[in-house]
Amino acid sequence: ASMLWRKRVTAIASEFPDVELSHMYVDNAAMQLVRNPKQFDTIVTNNIFGDILSDEASMITGSIGMLPSASVGESGPGLFEPIHGSAPDIAGQDKANPLATILSAAMLLKYGLGVESAAKRIEAAVTETLDNGFRTGDIYSPGTTLVGCKRMGEEVLKALESQK
């Protein structure tokens, strides 16, 4: 499957000469993500490697609850979702970090629907909420305010509303 993937990506890359393409083995990509994550703008990989690399990359941000993702194609707006799963172990306990879901909605607006101004407002509201020190348990540290999923969402909404 990896060789088929590489052949297809290489063939398609010729249609986009302004986009730099480089290939890496997944173990090297995992190391490079830790060593210098800013070198990557986009990583395109198959599902199994993508699952592994996205989980690793999430820890660079501090939590798997912080990263949105997108699966896009030529038709339709695509699929926009957080990289994390459903977290059944904390379901109904008001512990989940909603920021990846909120940022996935911003990605939908920007990349799926072409409403970049709305996406920027959501992204700014998330940044403001974090700048104000609100944290769910997965990203909490002393000196910040521990909140649950519901309150974090409410704080993002307040920040969004204050932009009007």
Image (tube, rainbow, N blue to C red):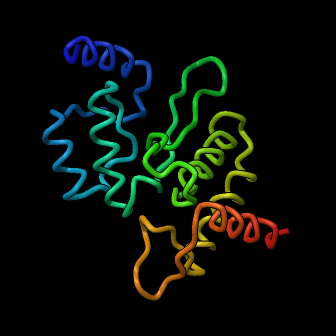
Q: Residue furthest right?
A: 164
Which image quarter is the N terminus in? top left
Front-lying residue, 109 or 101: 101
Q: Which residue lies furthest to the bottom in this view?
A: 143
Q: Is residue 153 above or below residue 106?
A: below
Front-lying residue, 21 or 8: 8
Image quadrant where residue 112 sits = top right
Q: Residue 85's x, y, as percent?
A: 45, 40
Image quadrant where residue 152 sits = bottom right
Q: Residue at x 58, y 36 (%)?
A: 80
Which image quarter is the C terminus in? bottom right
Q: In this view, does 14 lie above or below 135?
A: above
Q: Residue at x 15, y 33 (%)?
A: 25
Q: How many marks?
A: 0
Q: Which residue is drawn at 32% across and 57% down?
A: 59
Q: Residue at x 40, y 79 (%)?
A: 141
Residue 14 horizontal side relative to residue 132, left or right: left
Q: Residue 33's x, y, as percent?
A: 25, 51
Q: Residue 45's x, y, as percent?
A: 32, 29
Residue 124 horizontal side relative to residue 28, left or right: right
Q: Is residue 35 above or below residue 84?
A: below
Q: Residue 18's x, y, as percent?
A: 42, 33
